[in-house]
Image: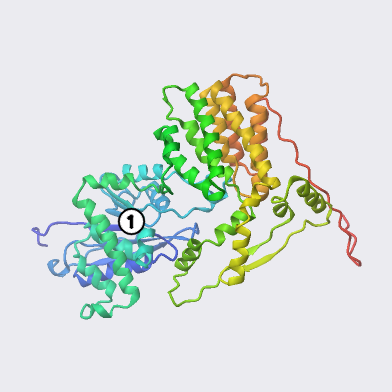
Amino acid sequence: MNRTQPITQPITLLICALGGEGGGVLTEWLVDTARHAGYAAQSTSIPGVAQRTGATTYYVEVFPVPLAELQGRRPVFSLSPVPGALDALISSELLETARQIGNGMSTAARTLVISSSSRTLTTAERMQPGDGRADAERLLDVVKAFSREHHVFDMGAAAREAGTIVSAVMLGAIAGSGLFPFPRDACERVVRGGDTRAPEKLDKMAAASLRGFAKAFDTVATPRAQAALVTNLLATTVNEAPVARALPADVAQIFPLPVHDLLTLGHARVLDYQDAGYAALYVDRLRQVLDAERAADPAGANGFAVTREMARWLALWMAFDDIVRVAELKSRASRARRVRDEVKAGDDDIVKVYDHFKPGAPEFAALLPPSLAQRVTAWDRRRKTPWALPLKVGSHSVFGMVSLRVLASLRWLRRRGSRFAEEQALIGRWLDAVVKGTRSDWCLGHEIALCGRLIKGYGSTNERGKRNLLHVIDHLATAPLPDGSPAARANAIAAAREAALADDAGTALDAALLRHGAPARPVPVQPIRWMKRPPGAATPTR
């Protein structure tokens, strides 16, 4: 044995991808690149559990010394990754990255972590009535704590911009990290298919893959050359909603700067939903909250959090969904462009879009005056089965688009409708509770404002959320309690709100109400519909 030959270990890489993202292709690219460059390499795949679109991991080992320098010797590779012995971990999904770190695959002393900041929600996250998403900031903290170097960016967005799949972006990120001793052109050669004599003859897939490769390469290589840029990159990985339009100057002067971001979005949403008068009502309501918060917290020590939360949830409630809003959103030109982009349609391609609707009597009654609306809903309750009108509208056709635009133009009728009046009355009750609660105790007002999270969805989900909110306000915010102090009320409201968001059936909410001395929610009235047994049907037996 030549004692002068340095003893080295293989470079180890774990690739984590979801089904359909080309993790196997990426592994083949890396192994082919290594072998063409004269290095020994081996890969294995580890099928994962069926979560989201199916997580699969691939393990790659590359010996960093060229075969020509090994004097005929061959390295011995491992078939599976060893926790704590990884040189690099790359993942196309942030929660999957954290999951592998939780398995001990990454260490702060050794492992380079390259991860996408994008998320594909798990089934457990989707099942939560409230916001069940894992906290992205906490996941990023895990990545930072258990890596010697980390690069986090939105791989999905980079792939979409380049018109390719995530595997090409991941290859570019690996090449840009300097993990393997291959030059950039060696990786690009494999993506091209090995032929570099006629780059102008590249097919569309290879060209798109090279665009994605280059974008990721620059994203990772640039901050490595400028270490100060890494922190800035990670600080901007959380997606923030863009500001829709500038806040009117007269409105901006009323509210403090910490409120402006959410106020701008809320004001734009309400203005887009109805008209300038409705946006002015939104500002007036929010100003009532601001006055109450300034009275309770003159120094603004809490960052005007009550007003900020109300700016968010008040706008969402005031812009409630109805058939006019649905028609307007589905007939927008931006929606047509988004659909064409999603199906990757060319300029000459024909795309047909059919929208399915099934509005019932309550949806039509919502646009009628209260007296007529009551008659329509009473008639619907007397029917054996609720009335509904199934519709299939081709929004790509002239007739379909005209139908949607005509319905969308009825926003002026919304103000005269029964539902508009009902929603404004309910919003007024919630707003009054927030204002009074804030003047009494800042924490109490803040908890009541956060109850706006209960209003979401449409149909029965929306109605249930409003009933829950009003019951919490009536019995925990104002009604007598065994401990009626503001602090106790705030704690009770917080517990009830979290219980309502965690349990769609409402069992946890009722338990929380009873635990704090409030009555459980009343059982909602449900009509009993008697159905005739079809002739000849067998009589049920026990």
- Is the N terminus in the top left, top right, bottom left or bottom right quadrant? bottom left
Q: How crowded is mark 1: few (under 14 residues within 10 Å), some or many (20 or more)?
A: many
From the viewer's perspective, is 91 left or right of 468?
A: left
Residue 21: quadrant of the picture = bottom left
Residue 301 versus residue 42 in the image, above or below? above
- Identity of the residue drawn at 68% across and 21% down: 480
Residue nearest the observer in this picture, 377 or 406: 406
From the viewer's perspective, is 190 left or right of 484?
A: left
Q: Position of residue 80 (x, y in %)?
A: 35, 59
Q: Where is residue 11 in the image (x, y as percent from the top left)?
A: 24, 58
- Check disc 1 and report its element: helix, strand or loop: strand
Q: Position of residue 100 (x, y in %)?
A: 39, 51
- Is the C terminus in the top left, top right, bottom left or bottom right quadrant? bottom right
Residue nearest the observer in this picture, 40 or 448: 448
The residue that disc 1 covers is 90
Residue 383 seen anywhere in this rendered image of the structure: yes
The furthest residue to the left: 4
- The colouring scheme, among rainbow, by chain, secondary structure or one colour, is rainbow
Residue nearest the observer in this picture, 227 or 273: 273
Q: Position of residue 527 (x, y in %)?
A: 81, 48
Residue 138 versus residue 324 in the image, above or below? above
Q: Callout 1, which amino acid?
A: Ile
Residue nearest the observer in this picture, 352 or 211: 352
Residue 130 seen anywhere in this rendered image of the structure: no
Residue 258 versus residue 367 in the image, above or below? above
Q: How many labels does the image show?
A: 1
